[in-house]
């Protein structure tokens, strides 16, 4: 395919390795793309049954999973699917022991839905000792009158209503009719004992109310939304307010049937609306220091029942505030108003914000002098809230079971580190649209709001992860609030969010048995039912390092390395974080060399099969927008840190190493259904490097957030005609918001591929940019996504591999440790 290549874009900037690099042939180094494509082809016609000790598909592959006791890797993925039997072996392997849990993940096409089990007022059977839930890995005893917990080994007698005799194999005779005994992922309906409890009354409330705060258990209710619109001058002038109102107007039919919503607007005052009245009168609260709700009824309505009233109001709001814009935006008081409206029931606050809050609670001073803080100890201050009020608001919302999501459409600095902390602490999401352009990004905004409303969501969530005897939990990473040492609290938790949990040995594990992980999320569904989402996995225990590496999972390991690095942003210098990442990568490869590889020359770099792509993914983490060396605004860094601390394994792999497609080289059948399987034929992706590109080619790069179409300067006029309907590169409009739909074979192919990707992301559309070679600014974004090149202030993949190799050689030849100090291994083990 590649007879020549283009020169590296002149605006790419990086650094060479220090010292004398080992010469490495770029054509012979391991390719992440080859591993991804091999795995994709291996699993596209296969079924994954989840047996302990079996190979697991990569997160980037599309597979069909059958749950036979182990939860699908979509829900729970391990860094190694074989657990070391001792802490010594775990330390020798240097593979972090981590579970990545995405409890509400979307199922694959045709997969069985998660079963819903109702035990009535008795609730699901639980261990009397560790409070673990009944699951397929429990052992039945005493003729079926008791079960032995696989987590702690304690025997618990069953209620008479749940008793069943055992057959000759010591299985319950009703085993096949009990979903909780057959599948690893189950939803339990739970009784009133599991209801959320209102927070204890405080001496100082964040809002004013004539009524005393609710106490005791709260009855589950269908999900309530509060939509809060910034109506300040910035929002009006940028077109954000009109686009936000139009987007919500178009999404009204997507709301869950029993849900309800309220609408709030704010500038330097707060504006509430009585939606029970056809005229939807506006009530203004000017006291933003002591926020209160000015109406008892009519604030929340069903979007279907009151659709006409809501539509009229959404059309009127942009016109109403266009004539009287204010400069200030009281975001803090608006969030406290949402907190007051949802207190006692929980829900979801969705904010459209266009400017930095400068008035009321959490008012922020001017923009910091970022340029003077980079590469100094003060830089860490850019990645933490400047006002602790935002942490307090986030903690208050999480405690009340309220999630906060924000659409940020600012034209200048907005301090994502401060206001974004509310979304991070409540399990919400940030949607980032700097210099918002309605013509280009309205469809993106619409797809994001639809996904927010329609995806599987639980609210008022409490999560606990349990592990079997001999293991203990040491740390958790993600966007949540911690309640005590073991429980994680989420205002909302949805299908796109995942958390990671690290483990440590507390004793020696039995190599003849399994280790177990069980995650349980207590939540309220959108239709108002209290449930527990349970996920289980059984993992073989091994005593050889080779077995640990044999079933090591590169996706989960890279996921952990990224989150571990991001978690240090507010305390460590960026250069130290990047150096630690390099040493952590070298530690794993050195451990394999020492424990598993045959004796060979120290000049030979030995890579385990499971971790062949680890160096390039480690380099990709260093080049991510939150950690890269080039000066990046703190808002951009903080947004990407928030995203990567919440996104799924699949999304983070595509973000770190974006798929690159050569559209000029598609086979005729690519992008069309296979006549035998009826599955869309997806083309092969290529390596992220200019070395493999051609000046006459057209390439598509998509990291899930942004999609860039790069067009070479020597492109064929026929290609342009097939894709854009013009035959001259200079006549092509680089500001096109999307690829035009044409009646050509190539256009149909590309649109089918994009539709498939959009479906796999739950309908979310990335921003679209065109980059003509050496002509358009979007080429900078494209070249920065070429991970294997020398760019973003960081070295190329061959040079980075040389650095890793030299670190390993140094230890092999002279002994000691990598970097001469503590690495990630000491913090994990």
Image (cartoon, rainbow, N blue to C red):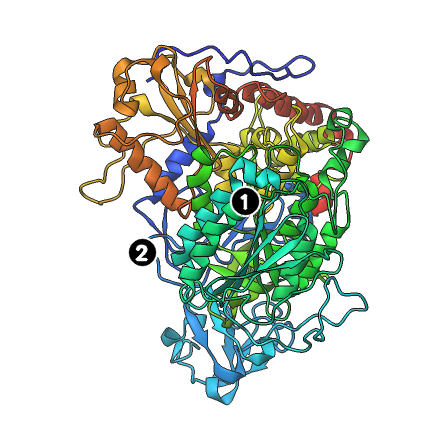
**Closest to the observer: 473 or 500?**
500
Q: Which residue is mark 2?
A: 110
Coordinates of residue 567 in the picture (x, y in percent): 68, 43
For the residues labelled 2 and 1, the Cα–Cα distance comes to: 25 Å
**Local crowd at mark 2 within 10 Å, few (<14), some, or many (≥20)?**
few
Residue 449 seen anywhere in this rendered image of the structure:
no
Q: What residue occupies the far front of the structure in this picture?
A: 323
Q: Residue 486 at what x, y percent from top left? A: 68, 62
Location of residue 545 with respect to 218 vertically, above or below: above
* Secondary structure of the residue carrying numbered label 2: loop
Between label 2 and label 1, give the one nearer the viewer.
2
Closest to the observer, 377 or 763: 763
Label 1 neighbour load within 10 Å: few <14, some 14-19, many 20+: many
Residue 369 seen: yes
Q: Residue under label 1, please give it.
A: 556
Where's residue 660, x and y in %? 41, 28
Q: Earlier in the sequence, mark 2 or mark 1?
A: 2
The residue shown at (64%, 48%) is: 267
Residue 632's image quarter?
A: top right
Number of residue marks? 2
Where in the figure is residue 386, as x and y percent of width and height? 77, 42
As drawn, 474 above or below 676:
below
Q: Which mark is residue 313?
A: none
Instruction: Looking at the picture, tell me which residue is in the foreground, 224 or 242.
Output: 242
- Determine whether, in the image, residue 352 is placed left or right of residue 178: right
């Amino acid at each position: 395919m590649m007879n020549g290549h283009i020169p590296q874009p002149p605006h790419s900037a990086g650094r060479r390795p220090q010292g004398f690099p080992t010469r490495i042939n770029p054509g012979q180094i391991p390719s992440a793309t080859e591993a991804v494509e091999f795995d994709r082809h291996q699993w596209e016609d296969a079924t994954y049954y989840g047996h302990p000790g079996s190979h697991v598909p990569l997160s980037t592959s599309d597979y069909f999973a059958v749950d036979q006791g182990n939860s699908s890797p979509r829900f729970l993925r391990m860094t190694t699917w074989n657990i070391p039997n001792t802490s010594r072996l775990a330390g020798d392997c240097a593979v972090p022991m981590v579970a990545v849990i995405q409890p509400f993940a979307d199922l694959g096409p045709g997969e069985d839905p998660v079963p819903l089990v109702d035990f009535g007022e008795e609730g699901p059977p639980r261990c009397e000792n560790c409070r673990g839930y009944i699951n397929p890995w429990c052992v039945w005893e005493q003729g079926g009158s008791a079960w032995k917990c696989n987590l702690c080994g304690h025997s618990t007698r069953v209620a008479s209503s749940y008793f069943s005799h055992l057959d000759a194999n010591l299985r319950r005779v009703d085993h096949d009719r009990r979903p909780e005994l057959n599948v690893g992922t189950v939803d339990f309906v739970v009784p009133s004992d599991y209801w959320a409890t209102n927070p204890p009354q405080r001496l100082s409330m964040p809002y004013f109310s004539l009524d005393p705060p609710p106490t005791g258990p709260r009855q589950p209710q269908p999900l309530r939304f509060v939509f809060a619109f910034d109506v300040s001058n910035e929002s009006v002038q940028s077109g954000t307010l009109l686009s936000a109102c139009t987007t919500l107007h178009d999404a009204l039919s997507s709301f869950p049937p029993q849900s309800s919503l309220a609408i709030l607007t704010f500038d330097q005052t707060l504006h509430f609306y009585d939606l029970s009245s056809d005229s939807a009168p506006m009530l203004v609260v000017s006291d933003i220091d002591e926020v209160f709700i000015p109406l008892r009824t009519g604030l929340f309505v069903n979007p279907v029942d009151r659709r006409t009233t809501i539509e009229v109001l959404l059309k009127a709001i942009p016109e109403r505030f266009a004539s009287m814009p204010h400069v200030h935006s009281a975001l803090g008081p608006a969030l406290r108003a949402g907190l007051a409206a949802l207190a006692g029931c929980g829900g979801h606050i969705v904010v459209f914000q266009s400017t930095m809050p400068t008035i009321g609670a959490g008012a922020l001073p001017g923009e910091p002098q970022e340029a003077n803080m980079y590469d100094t100890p003060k830089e860490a201050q850019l990645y933490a809230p400047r006002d602790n009020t935002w942490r307090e608001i986030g903690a208050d919302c999480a405690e009340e079971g309220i999630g906060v999501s924000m659409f940020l459409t600012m034209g200048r600095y907005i301090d994502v580190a401060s206001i974004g902390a509310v979304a991070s602490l409540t399990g919400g999401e940030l949607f980032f649209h700097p210099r918002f352009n309605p013509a280009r990004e309205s469809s993106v905004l619409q797809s994001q709001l639809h996904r927010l409303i329609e995806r599987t969501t639980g609210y008022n969530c409490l999560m606990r992860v349990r592990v079997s005897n001999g293991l203990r939990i040491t740390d958790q990473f993600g966007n949540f609030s911690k309640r005590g040492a073991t429980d994680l609290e989420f205002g909302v938790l949805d299908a796109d969010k995942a958390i990671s949990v690290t483990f440590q040995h507390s004793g020696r594990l039995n190599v003849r048995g399994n280790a177990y992980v069980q995650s349980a999320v207590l939540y309220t569904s959108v239709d108002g039912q209290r449930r527990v989402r349970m996920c289980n996995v059984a993992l073989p225990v091994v005593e050889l390092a080779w077995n640990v590496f044999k079933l090591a999972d590169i996706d989960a390991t890279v996921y952990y390395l990224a989150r571990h690095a991001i978690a240090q942003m507010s305390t460590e210098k960026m250069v130290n974080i990047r150096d630690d990442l390099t040493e952590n990568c070298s530690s794993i490869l050195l451990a394999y060399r020492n424990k598993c590889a045959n004796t060979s020359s120290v000049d030979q770099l030995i890579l385990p099969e499971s971790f062949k792509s680890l160096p390039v993914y480690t380099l990709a983490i260093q080049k991510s927008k939150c950690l890269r060396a080039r000066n990046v605004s703190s808002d951009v860094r903080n947004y990407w840190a928030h995203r990567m601390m919440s996104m799924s394994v699949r999304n983070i792999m595509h973000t770190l190493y974006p798929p690159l497609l050569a559209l000029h080289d598609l086979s005729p059948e690519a992008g069309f259904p296979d006549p035998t399987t009826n599955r869309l034929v997806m083309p092969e992706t290529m390596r992220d490097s200019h070395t493999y590109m051609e000046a006459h080619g057209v390439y598509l790069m998509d990291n899930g957030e942004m999609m860039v179409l790069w067009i070479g300067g020597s492109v064929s006029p026929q290609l342009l005609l097939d894709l854009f309907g013009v035959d001259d590169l200079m006549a092509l409009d680089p500001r096109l918001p999307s690829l035009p739909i044409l009646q050509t074979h190539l256009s149909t192919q590309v649109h089918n591929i994009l539709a498939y990707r959009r479906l796999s992301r739950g309908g979310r559309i990335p921003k679209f940019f065109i980059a003509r070679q050496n002509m358009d600014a979007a080429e900078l974004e494209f070249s920065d996504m070429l991970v294997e090149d020398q760019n973003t202030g960081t070295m190329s993949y061959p040079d980075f591999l040389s650095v890793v190799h030299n670190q390993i050689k140094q230890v092999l030849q002279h002994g000691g440790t990598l970097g001469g100090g503590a690495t990630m291994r000491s913090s994990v083990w």
